[in-house]
């Protein structure tokens, strides 16, 4: 709380808060504090927070910004009858002309991909998006988004920023097998692949890949984290989807996988994943050459990359820092439950096992 008060006293016009889930803060105390903050506050509680070359399962970061933002939140995302069309439409009209939109969502909510599509329908491709999923690895909805109304659960937070960000998105995963067709799915649950039970097809491909990974009744996530699915886009790249648990013979993913999607089973080697991080930082640095900035670099890095890389995750962070502008201030970020961005001329997407690096232009 002292750092929040210091940031406000220093003249911050808005506050970005990142906190780690294992802090297990007193929810009532947090709510009481948030409701007293006189400037706009946003951000969330994530599996890990990132500062420079390290990630942390405990702790918080307070980032006082010298520009104001406009925010809005949509709640009850997992309720199938939630109609957020009018609310998003009104906010889009209110913030027309803003070049950047941060998006934070409870990563354990349902219907996230559908919501992202709706956001894109109203805001279009003329703005830059960045953000990701907050929440807990215990795979349950819980209060995890900071707002002036208190902590929010099962919600999305939209933050319109009148300041241009430059973004790059990379993942480093490569094709192992496919293409396959998702012949039956229910939102984020894949039931049939090529008219066969989804788990049977998935298991066969992975166990044929080598002797290192064999499924047992207790190790699905430990094996599956190394073999995500890639939904093929029109340009031949992938939106990565994370199978996180079994439900009978169905694969439960972090976000929706539509029926009739063309997918591949992917595989990633450590050097490829770290190389993708290096590439992302280098690319966004090239874009910034003419616009030196005093703002920190922002990183939204999927928590499953940390779980896969384990002790090598610091190598990924080192690779990012080594390729950022030499005079760039600190790298701050979070390990997310899904990542949100648009890149190049492509639509807004909800990704898994991906990383997003953003730099704000200097004023």
Image (cartoon, helix red, strand yellow):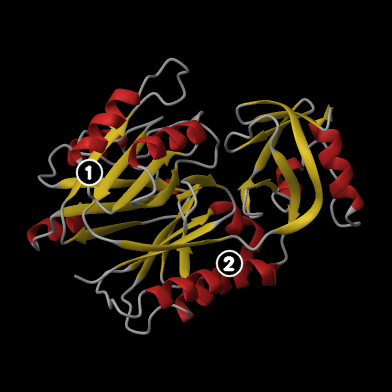
Q: Dot 2: within a 10 Å radius of its alpha carbon, few (fewer than 14), some, or many (20 or more) residues? A: many
Mark 1 near mark 2, Cβ–Cβ under 8 Å?
no
Q: Residue at x 12, y 47 (%)?
A: 39
The crowd level at tag 1 (other Cα within 10 Å; few <14, some 14-19, many 20+) is: few
Residue depicted at 23% across the width and 72% down the height: 362
- Give the CA distance from mark 1 to mark 2: 39 Å
Looking at the image, residue 28 sits to the left or right of residue 308; the answer is left
Q: Nearer the viewer, mark 1 or mark 2?
A: 1
Relative placement, left or right, of 23 versus 224 is left
Q: Residue furthest top?
A: 81
State the residue lying farthest toward the bottom: 326
Q: Quadrant of the C terminus?
A: bottom left
Element carrying mark 2: helix
Above/below status of 240 relative to 301: above
Instruction: Specify the label residue 96 is tagged with.
Output: 1
Residue 119 locus on image (x, y percent): 38, 37
* Residue 179 x, y percent position in the rendering: 79, 45
Residue drawn at x 28%, y 78% is 292
Left or right for 8, reference 193: left
Residue 293 percent coordinates (x, y): 26, 74
Q: Report the front residue among 151 and 348.
A: 348
At 55% from the left and 72% from the top, the residue drawn is: 279
Closest to the observer: 275 or 26?
275
Disc 2: which residue: 313
Between residue 114 and residue 37, name the one nearer to us: 114
Name the side, left or right, on which 352 lies relative to 214. left
Q: Can residue 251 be seen from the camera position used here?
A: yes
**Residue 354, image quadrant:** bottom right
The answer to whether any part of residue 338 appears in the image is no
Classify mark 1: helix, strand or loop.
Answer: loop
Q: Nearer the viewer, residue 216 or 181?
A: 181
């Amino acid at each position: 709380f002292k750092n929040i008060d210091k940031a406000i006293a220093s003249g911050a016009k808005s506050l970005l808060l990142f906190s780690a889930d294992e802090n297990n803060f007193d929810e009532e105390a947090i709510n009481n504090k948030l409701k007293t903050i006189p400037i706009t506050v946003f951000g969330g509680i994530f599996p890990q927070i990132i500062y420079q070359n390290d990630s942390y399962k405990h702790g918080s970061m307070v980032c006082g910004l010298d520009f104001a933002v406009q925010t809005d939140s949509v709640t009850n995302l997992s309720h199938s009858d939630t109609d957020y069309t009018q609310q998003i439409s009104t906010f889009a009209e209110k913030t027309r002309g803003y070049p950047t939109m941060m998006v934070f969502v409870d990563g354990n909510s349902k219907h996230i991909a559908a919501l992202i599509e709706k956001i894109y329908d109203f805001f279009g491709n003329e703005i830059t998006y960045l953000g990701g999923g907050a929440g807990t690895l215990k795979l349950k909805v819980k209060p995890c988004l900071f707002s002036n109304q208190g902590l929010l659960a099962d919600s999305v937070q939209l933050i319109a920023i009148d300041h241009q960000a430059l973004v790059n998105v990379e993942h480093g995963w490569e094709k192992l097998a496919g293409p396959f067709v998702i012949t039956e799915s229910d939102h984020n649950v894949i039931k049939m692949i090529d008219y066969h039970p989804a788990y049977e097809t998935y298991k066969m491909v992975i166990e044929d890949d080598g002797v290192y990974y064999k499924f047992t009744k207790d190790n699905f996530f430990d094996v599956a984290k190394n073999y995500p699915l890639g939904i093929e886009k029109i340009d031949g790249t992938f939106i990565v989807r994370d199978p996180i648990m079994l439900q009978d013979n169905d694969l439960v993913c972090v976000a929706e996988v539509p029926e009739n999607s063309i997918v591949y089973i992917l595989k990633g080697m450590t050097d490829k994943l770290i190389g993708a991080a290096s590439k992302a930082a280098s690319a966004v640095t090239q874009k910034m050459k003419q616009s030196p900035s005093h703002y920190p670099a922002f990183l939204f890095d999927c928590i499953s990359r940390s779980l896969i890389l384990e002790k090598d995750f610091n190598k990924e962070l080192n690779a990012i820092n080594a390729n950022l502008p030499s005079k760039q201030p600190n790298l701050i970020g979070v390990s997310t439950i899904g990542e949100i961005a648009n890149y190049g001329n492509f639509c807004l997407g909800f990704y898994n096992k991906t990383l997003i690096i953003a730099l704000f232009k200097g004023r």
